[in-house]
Amino acid sequence: MALSSKIREFHEKREKLLLGGGEQTVEKQKAMGKRTARERISALLDEGSFTEYDLFVKHVAHDFDMGDKSLPGDGVITGTGTIDGSPVAVFAQDFTVAGGSLGLMHSRKITKIMDHALKMRMPLIGINDSGGARIQEGVNSLAGYGEIFFRNTLSSGVIPQISVILGPCAGGAVYSPALTDFVFVVDNISKMFITGPEVIKTVLGEEISMEDLGGARVHSEISGNAHFFAGSEEECFAQIKKLIGFIPRNNTEKAGVLTSAEPLTAHEIDGIVPDDPTLPYDVRDVIKAVADNSDFFEVMENFAGSIVIGFGRIEGRTAGFVANQPLEMAGVLDVDSSDKAARFIRFCDAFNIPVITFVDIPGYLPGADQEHAGLIRHGAKILYSYSEATVPKITVILRKAYGGGYIAMGSRHLRADFVFAWPAAEIAVMGPEGAANIIFRKEIMSSADPEETRRQKIEEYRKKFANPYVAASRGYIDAVIEPSETRKFIAHSLKVSENKEIQLPPKKHGLPPF
Amino acid sequence: MIEMKKTSQEGKLNIDGTVYRTRLSRKFIKRAPFSPSDPFLLTSIIPGTILDIMVKPGQTVVKGEALMILEAMKMQNVLKSPAGGTVRMIAVKKGDRVGKGSPLLRIG
């Protein structure tokens, strides 16, 4: 009988802790349109797969009457589970317990699960919903953040790290998500900033709402801090599961292979790209016409639209797509689009995901604002990422590839493994209009009919250089292919590069311009 | 999936002499045109409050002379004259709150 009373005592203790902050605080959480930390974990993981650690951890603060306070789980729930059968480590801050504030033991629970994830080489998913540092715990709280950031950095490029912002994430706390690979936000729920509206008002006299300062839309559209935007928590969890399906568990594995599925829109591929290089189209249609099931999972959909990045599959294997988007800003490279693509390429390279690049680029965006914002150093990141990447790199030039843009977009010169060009490709130092104006300046100026001469010279240049054959004659591209052959050539390239092996020169680490 | 509001608009973009039909981003449309800085105009480098003004219109000043004190970020910043000359105009008075880039004083 003694045993059963111990078990009963254990059940009572556990039941109490599982309630988190209690009924009232849970009601408040719901009133804000948010789920509880436990509900979130259940929604994210396979049913019944969650195994919790450290439920019985207690805070160790004594100052400011903290000694008497009970904080269930110290405001964070940690453990492991599976998503579609694949193991993941999870922590979820519990806003119903002391506002999810981070104290010493709270941080120890997080760093313990982080160490576990790294040791076991499985993805880490952190659900953030916290008022920030637990002020009563002073410097211990700061130490806690530091230990987390340090582990984020050590784990970077070893295991995928995912941050989900489902509430406030303010002050120093933002730097854990910022160090991770993908940040998920939900409309009206996520709030991220270093200094809040109150401080901004006091110090600078500027009035701004929390939503306008660091809401989900701001980070998806303007700052580029978030990678996935959802309208609800439910949609957000579906996105996370989808992402987990595309990526491997760690840097020594490859992503899971599915059965090959023909693209649903394969037959449309001939009609997507207009011959006239100045006309827009949606490059996502090309990706969908090539990817398995026409399924393209876009990353940073609402930020720096002149470049498109995301995951898809070719014959069942995950690939990272990078494509200029003529629909937005003519598909230029600018400060933001360079940064966006460069980071994505590095993720793919770190996690053994081949990079497929679709090129249709007029060049870099001109302007004092761009130059002053550091277009040189940001633009350099994309060159660096392509050059450094040792995963299979396949580049298809759809239409124009002019000047520096041609070099940057996964060219042969940055060690692309396969470079193909469609027959309408124009691989040249610049567009025919610009080139003719420079090369034939004297003839145009001295002509009796300068406009007619200009037209003739543009045509002459177009015929001679605005095609794929000059580059092909030097071996800078491997084959000129028809649009409808694109999937076949990519699939073949991926197959023959399965055992690709190249080494970078030994070094401690490179110095990309960030 | 809920749609984000369209933040770009149809337009044209000239890159290296070729004009492309495309959508222009909000960031591009809202970009501030470059304006060269005026060496005789003192502007606020940060939003804040004018605590004190040490000169008067018509007064002769040398380059680097303290002109006013701008309190911002809990710091008292001494604003020094960008050039030597005569104080032509003072656009603010003691206690004024100023935004970033506000003109404060002109030397002639």
Image (cartoon, grey):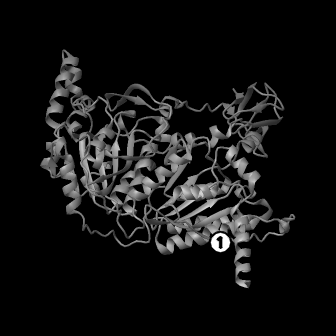
Residue type of the residue flagged with mark 1: Asp
Residue A503 appears in view: yes
Frontmost residue, A34 versus B25? A34
Residue depicted at x 77% and y 41%: A202
Give the percent coordinates (x, y) of residue A364: 37, 40
Frontmost residue, A337 versus A232? A232
Give the percent coordinates (x, y) of residue A7: 69, 77
Give the percent coordinates (x, y) of residue A257: 31, 61
Q: In the rendered view, would you say A86 is above or below A171?
A: below
Q: Is residue A452 left or right of residue A369?
A: left
**Quadrant assignment, res A483:** top left
Q: Is residue A462 left or right of residue A60?
A: left
Q: In the rendered view, would you say A2 is above or below A213?
A: below
Q: How many labels were placed on the picture?
A: 1
Residue depicted at x 74% and y 54%: A23
**Quadrant assignment, res A285:** top left
Quadrant containing the C terminus of chain B in the rendered view: top right
Frontmost residue, A326 versus A104? A104
**SS at badge 1:** loop
**Looking at this rendering, what residue extends furthest in the top direction?**
A448
Give the percent coordinates (x, y) of residue B19: 32, 27
Q: In the rendered view, would you say A319 is above or below B55?
A: below
Q: Which residue is mark 1?
A: A54
> Which chain is home to disc 1?
A
Q: In the rendered view, would you say A349 is above or below A482?
A: below
